[in-house]
Image (cartoon, rainbow, N blue to C red):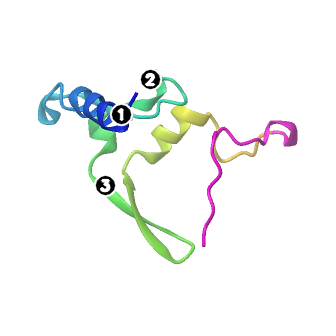
Amino acid sequence: MPTYKLINFINKNASKYPYEECKFIGAIVDCAHGAACEKMVKSEFEPRIQFEFEGEKFWGPKGYKEYLTSLYGNYNELPPVDKQVTHHDFEAYWK
């Protein structure tokens, strides 16, 4: 599928329902963990809050604990060494 068609498809689905009227929100672009766990109650997501990470500040959802738990379970505990693998299908480099 050409990139512009994919972008149009995503935008069409993303704007299918008015944001102000929705009870649930979530990631619709890359649901690597399944659509059910990418969905969260909008009131848990808003308002956004700032986090500091390695000296930089980033915005994130107020309900980050609920979101991370729905994706990873106990996200504060490292998985066994044999389960510590990437789930990405690309390589990224920081220059």
Indicate the quadrant where residue 18 lies: top left
Q: What is the CA distance from the residue labelled 3 to the residue labelled 2? A: 22 Å
Q: Earlier in the sequence, mark 1 or mark 2?
A: 1
In percent of width and height, residue 36 lies at 45, 21
Q: Are marks 1 and 2 in contact (CB under 8 Å)?
A: yes
Report if residue 93 lies within the magenta region.
yes
Label annotation for residue 48: 3
Q: In this view, does 43 lie to the left or right of 86?
A: left
Height in image: 12 above or below 49? Answer: above
Q: Which amino acid does label 1 sit on?
A: Gly
In the image, is 2 to the left or to the right of 75? Answer: left
Q: Which residue is drawn at 17% across and 35% down?
A: 19
- Between disc 3 and disc 1, whose residue precedes? 1
The three-letter amino acid code for the residue at tag 3 is Arg
Part of the protein shown in magenta: 80-95
Residue with the most extreme right position: 82
Instruction: Judge depth for marks 3 and 2 and give the one in front.
Output: 2
Residue 94: in magenta span: yes
Q: Where is residue 50 in the image (x, y as percent from the top left)?
A: 38, 64
The quadrant of the picture occupied by the C terminus is: bottom right
**Which residue carries the number 2 mark?**
35
Quadrant showing the N terminus:
top left
Along the viewing direction, whichever of 7 and 36 lies nearer the viewer: 7
Q: Earlier in the sequence, mark 3 or mark 2?
A: 2
Q: Name the residue under label 1.
A: 26
The one nearer the camera, 32 or 58, is 32
Label 1 and label 2: CA atoms lie apart by 8 Å
Alpha carbons under labels 3 and 1: distance apart: 14 Å
Q: What residue type is labelled 2?
A: Ala
Measured as percent of width and height from the top left, residue 30 is found at 46, 34
